[in-house]
Amino acid sequence: MSFETLKPKVDSIIESAEHSVEEKLTRVCELLQESLPAYDWVGFYFANHEQRTLHLKAFAGEPTDHTVIPFGKGICGQVAESNSNFVVPDVKAQDNYIACSIYVKAEIVIPLFKDGVNIGQIDIDSHTPDPFTEDDERFLEWVNEKVATIL
Ligand code: SME
């Protein structure tokens, strides 16, 4: 499914009156994971800035042991500090990487900003090597901007 087709579906999840924020986050994860073949695992982590840790709030795909990630650790922890998108075409080439599954080949993490503060991120794992393009970055930035409106 194309990103342009997905955008109104994300909008309707975000705008839905009868779901909690956590349900909306989970439904966005499920929508992306079911609609985009390279998106095998989709999750939202949110920062505890005092403890300098990331906490998994919602996901779609296999459960992960990595529900709490210290700032600086793994791809996710690096994005908590860099405030920048991190696209990993080949996870084996990364030294600072936390493996969630032996099947994962690639990963993309996009920070989520609320009022200019990096409060979390969307994280996608893929079993396909090098699947992510700048279009994925722009789409996921758009998703995070939408999500920020309900936080
Ligand atoms: N691979 C991530 C850890 C989270 S899992 O992908 C769900 C990382 O290196 O930060």
Image: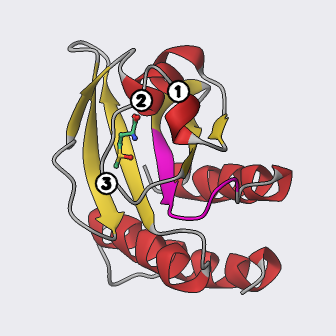
> For disc 3, does the CB lie below 8 Å from ligand 1?
yes
Pointer 3 residue: 101
Q: Residue 81: give x, y in percent of width and height.
A: 49, 15
> For disc 2, does the CB lie below 8 Å from ligand 1?
yes
User: Viewed as shown, does residue 56 lie left or right of 132?
Assistant: left
Q: Please rate how many residues cluster around mark 3, counting C-alpha atoms within 10 Å: few if below 14, some from 14 to 19, many from 20.
A: few
Is 123 one of the magenta-colored residues?
yes
SS class of the residue under badge 1?
Answer: loop
Mark 1 or mark 3: which comes first in sequence?
1
Q: Are discs 1 and 2 less than 8 Å apart at CB?
A: yes
Residue at x 30% of width, y 48% of height: 100
Q: Please rate how many residues cluster around mark 2, counting C-alpha atoms within 10 Å: few if below 14, some from 14 to 19, many from 20.
A: some
The residues colored magenta run 121-130
Pointer 2 residue: 97
Residue at x 31% of width, y 54% of height: 101
Which part of the image, by quadrant, shows the N terminus?
A: bottom right
Q: Nearer the viewer, residue 136 or 120?
A: 136
SS class of the residue under badge 3?
Answer: loop
Q: What's the CA distance linking mark 1 and mark 3?
A: 15 Å
